[in-house]
Image (cartoon, helix red, strand yellow):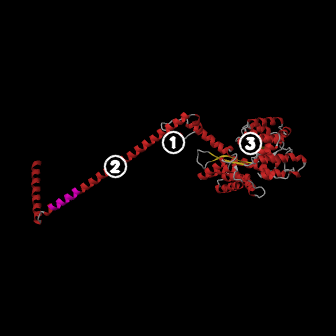
Amino acid sequence: LAIKGQVYIHPLTSPISIHNQITASYSTATKYSHFIVSKQHATATMDPYSSEGELVNMHTAFVQGQYQQVIDFDTSIFSAPNQPSAQILKYRAQLALQDYDSVSSSISSSDASSDPSLAAVKVYASYAASSFTSDSAVSQAESLSQSNSDNLSVQLLCGAVLARAGKTDEAIALLSQHQGSLDAVAMSTQIHLSNNRADLAAKEAKSARSFAQDALLVNLAESWISLREGGDAKYQQAFYVFEELAQAPGSSAVTSLVAQAVSELHLGRYPEAETALQQALDIEPDNTTALANAVVLFTATGDIERAAEMKKKLQGTKGGEETELLQGLAAKKEAFDAACEKYQPKFEPYCQFKLDIKRVGKNQEEWRQYERDMKRYEESQEKRRKHNENTRQRKRQEGERLEQKRLEQERRSGNIFKRGLFNTQIFLNSFEPEDFSSIGETLHETGQGMKAAWEDILR
């Protein structure tokens, strides 16, 4: 089981928009280590890892994500009938730690051909070692599923292969044949969640609750469903489960710390989420799930530099390129580039001239065209720069000329006014005081004469 806590953000939207699709899940040594239940087998008791069996402590450590503890478990204390199941659990723990080659080499072809459980382990190891791309491994998983559908290891490991290959209906059909296995319940729950069928996942968990009571895997399955369904009450309910696992000394592991961080992210408690993720990375610096969620966290908080740093670490980590976060970003980038190729602007922006090494390597003519385009683009940019500079200079000179003209007009207007005042003063100073009385009398006589003239005219 490996916890898978993935928070998605849309790369072209606001960095604070967190997508609802968060899966914080424990898995059976796989990216899809998920598990299911079927109603017709709800009361069966053939699960070797049930709470009544002697493998319960070893299996609980596995569910809690304490894989190294499972590998180091002393299996000599178990009875002979449980030895094979204990060994399979150890193999699953190694697979969860991405130790694919060691698992594959430790199972001979003869052992795999005689034991379907070992064959299922070997098939999954080869599929994971191929970065989950081997078609032959998928074919082998389908063949094993048809011939040994009642084998729990085949159900879990081959079901994981089929689910990862996109054959979710086949995986569900295979897992539905389990006999009271909570591992199968958890895997089915996760497959339904990956198909956005929270309703079917809830039915699986409810069916398991009817016969498993307070089993850890049932609590986990219900917590994954709560994260998908959403709402603060649901998020808080899931948080309590994951926090209890993460903070208890006996159950704490990277998987539970990441799950706690995912719950905190949903609740908007970013500082607490960062603390939990940092604890996980302190334990396991190259944990891909913790790094992926760290990218989301720092993007949501607007810390773009740290988000880019975590993304770079994720890309350089084993299995990092297979994470859904990076695959989703790559798919969006490819779709965006394809859309850009449909448009041919007259002057393409600089980003359109970025060199594609592989494409240019195949066709030197495209490289020469690239150089010509770049030269044309740079010339057009230089011409535009000079034109803009000349325009700014002309506007500046015109502004200066108009300002000089305005100042000159103000100066001249001021001089005329001053000259008028000066001349008026000289004119007034040329008269003696008695002259003003004679001027008044003259003006009065003139006025009387003009009045008499107008009266004659009006008659």
Whichever of labels 1 and 3 marks the residue nearer the N terminus, that label is: 3
Disc 1 element: helix
Whichever of labels 2 and 1 marks the residue nearer the N terminus, that label is: 1
Span highlighted in magenta in the image: 415-426
Amino acid residing under circle 3: Ala
From the viewer's side, name the closer residue of 278 and 459. 278
Mark 1: give few (<14), some (14-19) or many (20+) Cα within 10 Å.
few
Query: Which residue is located at x 70 percent, y 52 percent?
Result: 258
Q: Residue furthest right?
A: 80
Disc 3 element: helix
Q: Distance between the residues labelled 1 and 3?
A: 40 Å
Residue at image mark 3: 129
From the viewer's side, name the closer residue of 352 and 433. 352
Residue at image mark 2: 397
Amino acid residing under circle 2: Gln
The picture places residue 219, in percent across and down from the top left corner, at 77, 50
Instruction: Give the label, 2 or 3, closer to the camera.
Output: 3
- Residue 253 visible? The answer is yes
Quadrant location of residue 114? top right
Residue at image mark 1: 350
The picture places residue 20, in percent across and down from the top left corner, at 66, 46
Query: Which residue is located at x 77 percent, y 35 percent?
Result: 139
